[in-house]
C-alpha cells in the first residue's frame, strides 16, 4: 500500500480526471458532428435529441450524480475498516436492485412510448411515432450507464479514476461508428441500436477494471449486515434534488420544442460545447475537493475548510473565466467549424452559437453554486441542500416562462438558468456562512479581481468561418485558440496568478 495520503495524490487524480474528461469531450464533439452531418438540424434531429435527452437527464438519478454521492463514502469506509465481504455484498445488492428497478421502467417506456413522448413534447404525430420507437432502447441504455456509474463509483472509492472517466470514450466511438454504418439501412433507428451497444460497452469496460479489486456481479437480495439502507437513504435525499434538475431540464426542452424549428437541436448542441470546459475543469476540482472537505469537516478543522473552499473557487475562476471568454468570442467560429456540414447549415450554426453565448455568461457562477452545494453535502446538510436545489429549479422554470412570454425567445433558457444559479449561490453563501462565507472573503475577491484584469479580450469582426467545416478553417480556429491560451498564460504571469499550482494541489489549495 502506498504511503501517500489522499491530499498528496489529489493533484495527480485531478490531472487524470481532467485528461480523461478532455478526451471524452473531444470525442463527444466528434459524435455531435457526425449526428449533425447525418441527421441535420430539422425535425428528425429534434426528435433524436429530445428523446435521448430523457435518459441523459435521468442519469443524474440513476447514474453518476446521486449514486456517487451515496456510495463513495460507504465503500470508502468499508475499505478503511477492511470489511471486504461486506462491501462485495453491498456491491451485489446495489447492482441487483438497480436491475430490478429498470425492468418496469423499460417495459413502461415500450408499452406507453407514444403517449409519453406526446406528454413531454409539442411534436407532430410523425415525430411522436419516431420518438416512441427510440424511447425504450434509450432507457435500456440508461440501465447500462447506471450500472457503469455504480462500477465507477466503487472504483473511485479505491482512488482509481482512469477507467471510470475513460469508459465514455467507448460509448462515443461505438455511437459514431454505428450511426455512420447503420443509418443507410435503419435510418434514425441506427441511433437507438448504437446507443444500446455503446452503453453496454461502457459498463463492460468499467466492470472489467473493477474485477481487479475482487468485485463480481452476482444476484443478491438479503441486506443484513450491510449499510444498504443508509446508502439508499443518502441516495434518496440527493436524488430529490437531482429529480428537480431533471424536471427542469425536461421543461427546458419542452419550451424549446415549442419555439422555432431547430431550437431543440441548438439547445442540445450548445450544451455540448458549454459542458466541454465546464466538465473538464469542474469535475477535476470538485471530485478531488469533496472528500477533502468531508475530512476537514469531520475533524472540526474550520480553517482548513475555508482554505479548501477559497482555493477551489479561485481555481475554478482561474480556469473557467478565460474558457468563457475564449469560447464566447469564438462561439460562431467554433460551432461552424465543428458542426457546419451536410444538412447542418450556417443558420443552424448561428442559432447554436446564439444559445451557447447565453450559457457561457453564467458558467463560472453556476460552478460556484455547484461547489457550494458540495460544501453542504460534505457537512451532512442534505435536507438544507435539497430545499435550496428545489428553490433554484422552481425559480429557473418560473423565469423561463416569464422571459418567453416577454418575447426574449430561445435566450430565455440560458438566461433563466444563470439567474437562478446566482440566486442559489447567494442563498448558500448565507446558509453555509458558519462553514465558509465567500461573500465576506477578501482574499477570494482579491484573486477574483486579478483574474478579471488578466482576462480582457476583444474580438475582430471576421467572417472566415462562414464557409463551415473544412481543414483550412480548422487550422485557423486552432491557431486562434492557441493564441488565446498564450494570452491567458502571459496575463496570468503578469498578474502573478499561480495557474500551475492548481494541478499541484488538485483544487482547493491556499490562495495568497
Image (cartoon, rainbow, N blue to C red):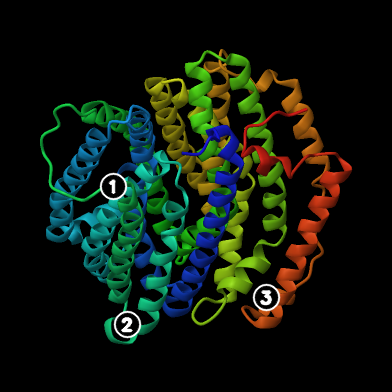
Q: Work out how far the residue at label 2 is from the one at label 3, CA to CA, in angstroms.
A: 28 Å
The residue indicated by pointer 1 is: 214
Tell which residue pokes out farthest to the bottom in this image.
184
* Pointer 3 with pointer 1, Cβ within 8 A: no
Name the spot of residue 200 as percent of width and height, x first: 28, 63
Q: Work out how far the residue at label 3 is from the one at label 1, CA to CA, in angstroms.
A: 46 Å
Is residue 408 something that shows in the picture?
no
The answer to which quarter of the image holds residue 435 is top right
Counting residues from the start of the chain, the first of labels 3 and 1 encountered is: 1
Residue 488 to residue 294: above or below:
below
Name the spot of residue 393 as percent of width and height, x first: 43, 35
Label disc, if present, on residue 474 of the rendered structure: 3
Q: Residues within 10 Å of mark 2 (few under 14, many from 20)?
A: some
Residue 118 to residue 370: above or below:
below
- The residue at 53%/29% (across/down) is 292
Q: Quadrant of the C terminus?
A: top right
Label disc, if present, on residue 182 of the rendered structure: 2
Residue 150 to residue 511: above or below:
below
- The residue at 35%/42% (across/down) is 154
The residue mark sitting in front, 3 or 1, is 1
Q: Secondary structure at mark 3?
A: helix
Query: For this view, does 2 lie left or right of residue 364?
Result: left
The residue mark sitting in front, 2 or 1, is 1
Q: Secondary structure at mark 2?
A: helix
Q: Looking at this view, is 143 or 71 the one in front?
A: 71
Query: For this view, does 503 lie left or right of residue 13?
Result: right
- The residue at 53%/18% (across/down) is 432
Is residue 103 something that shows in the picture?
yes
* Pointer 2 with pointer 3, Cβ within 8 A: no
Amino acid at each position: 500500500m502506498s504511503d501517500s495520503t489522499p491530499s498528496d495524490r489529489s493533484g495527480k487524480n485531478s490531472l487524470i480526471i481532467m485528461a480523461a474528461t478532455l478526451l471524452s469531450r473531444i470525442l463527444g464533439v466528434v459524435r455531435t458532428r457526425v449526428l449533425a452531418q447525418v441527421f441535420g438540424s430539422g425535425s428528425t434531429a429534434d426528435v433524436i435529441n429530445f428523446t435521448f435527452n430523457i435518459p441523459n437527464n435521468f442519469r443524474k438519478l440513476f447514474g453518476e450524480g446521486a449514486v456517487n454521492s451515496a456510495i463513495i463514502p460507504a465503500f470508502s469506509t468499508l475499505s478503511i475498516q477492511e470489511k471486504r465481504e461486506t462491501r462485495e455484498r453491498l456491491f451485489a445488492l446495489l447492482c441487483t436492485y438497480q436491475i430490478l428497478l429498470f425492468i418496469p421502467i423499460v417495459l413502461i417506456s415500450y408499452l406507453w412510448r407514444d403517449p409519453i413522448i406526446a406528454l413531454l413534447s409539442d411534436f407532430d404525430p410523425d415525430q411522436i411515432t419516431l420518438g416512441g420507437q427510440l424511447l425504450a432502447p434509450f432507457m435500456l441504455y440508461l440501465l447500462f450507464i447506471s450500472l457503469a456509474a455504480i462500477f465507477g463509483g466503487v472504483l473511485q472509492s479505491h482512488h482509481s479514476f482512469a477507467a471510470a472517466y475513460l469508459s465514455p470514450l467507448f460509448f462515443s466511438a461505438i455511437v459514431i461508428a454505428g450511426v455512420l454504418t447503420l443509418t443507410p439501412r435503419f435510418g434514425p433507428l441506427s441511433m437507438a441500436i448504437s446507443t444500446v451497444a455503446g452503453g453496454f460497452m461502457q459498463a463492460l469496460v468499467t466492470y472489467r477494471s473493477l474485477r481487479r479489486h475482487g468485485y463480481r456481479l452476482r444476484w443478491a437480495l438479503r441486506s443484513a449486515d450491510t449499510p444498504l439502507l443508509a446508502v439508499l437513504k443518502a441516495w434518496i435525499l440527493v436524488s430529490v434534488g437531482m429529480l428537480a434538475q431533471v424536471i427542469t431540464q425536461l421543461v427546458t426542452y419542452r419550451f424549446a420544442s415549442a419555439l422555432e424549428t431547430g431550437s431543440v437541436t441548438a439547445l442540445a448542441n450548445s450544451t455540448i460545447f458549454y459542458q466541454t470546459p465546464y466538465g473538464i475543469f469542474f469535475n477535476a476540482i470538485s471530485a478531488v475537493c469533496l472528500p477533502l472537505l468531508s475530512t476537514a469537516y469531520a475533524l472540526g478543522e474550520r480553517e482548513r475548510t475555508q482554505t479548501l473552499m477559497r482555493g477551489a473557487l479561485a481555481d475554478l475562476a482561474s480556469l473557467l473565466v478565460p474558457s468563457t471568454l475564449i469560447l464566447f468570442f469564438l462561439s460562431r467560429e467554433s460551432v461552424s467549424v465543428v458542426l457546419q456540414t451536410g444538412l447542418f447549415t450556417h443558420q443552424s450554426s448561428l442559432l447554436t452559437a446564439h444559445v451557447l453565448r447565453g450559457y457561457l455568461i453564467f458558467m463560472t457562477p453556476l460552478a460556484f453554486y455547484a461547489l457550494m452545494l458540495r460544501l453542504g453535502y460534505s457537512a451532512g446538510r442534505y435536507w438544507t441542500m435539497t430545499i435550496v436545489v428545489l428553490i433554484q429549479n422552481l425559480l429557473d422554470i418560473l423565469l423561463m416562462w416569464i422571459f418567453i412570454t416577454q418575447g426574449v425567445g430561445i435566450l430565455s433558457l440560458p438566461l433563466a438558468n444563470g439567474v437562478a444559479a446566482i440566486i442559489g449561490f447567494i442563498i448558500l453563501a448565507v446558509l453555509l456562512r458558519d462553514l465558509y462565507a465567500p461573500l465576506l472573503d477578501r482574499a477570494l475577491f482579491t484573486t477574483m479581481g486579478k483574474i478579471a484584469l488578466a482576462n480582457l479580450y476583444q474580438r475582430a469582426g471576421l467572417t472566415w468561418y462562414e464557409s463551415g467545416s473544412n481543414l483550412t478553417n480548422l487550422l485557423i480556429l486552432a491557431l486562434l485558440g492557441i493564441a488565446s491560451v498564450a494570452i491567458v498564460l502571459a496575463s496570468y504571469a503578469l498578474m502573478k496568478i499561480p495557474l500551475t499550482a492548481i494541478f499541484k494541489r488538485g483544487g482547493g489549495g491556499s490562495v495568497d
